[in-house]
Amino acid sequence: MAKKIIILNGSPRLNGNTSALTEQFTKGAEEAGNIVTEFHLSDMNIHGCLGCWHGGKDAAHP
């Protein structure tokens, strides 16, 4: 049974060592019949939590 594999590539260099590693991993995983999806986090517009309380239900916190 094929597995769905997600790779979260956090390297800012798109053609660096991490990409070379994930490329070889993807090749082997797909040859084994798995489905691989890779996300390059440096290309995504991600805004993580800053602990400011503005995103929560209780807006009374500073």
Image: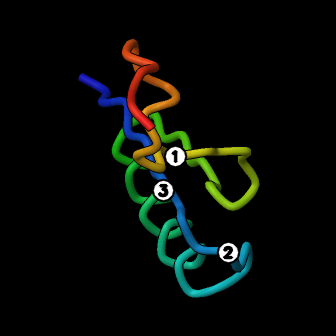
Image quadrant where one finds the C terminus: top left
How is the rendered protein coloured? Answer: rainbow
Quarter of the image holding residue 61? top left
Q: Which residue is mark 1?
A: 48
Quarter of the image holding residue 58? top left
Q: Nearer the viewer, residue 53 or 11?
A: 53
**N-term-proximal mark, 3 vs 2:** 2
- Please determine whether, in this image, residue 30 is positioned above or below residue 9: above
**N-term-proximal mark, 1 vs 3:** 3
Residue 59 at what x, y percent from top left? 46, 19
Q: What residue is shown at x 76% (from left), y 54% (from top)?
A: 43
Q: Are the two marked residues, 3 and 2, in contact with CB atoms closer than 8 angstroms? A: no
Residue 8 at what x, y percent from top left? 48, 53
Q: Which residue is mark 3?
A: 26
- Please determine whether, in this image, residue 27 is positioned above or below residue 37: below
Q: What residue is shown at x 56% (from left), y 48% (from top)?
A: 38
Please, which residue is most extreme toward the bottom here?
Answer: 17
Q: CA distance from mark 1 to mark 2?
A: 17 Å
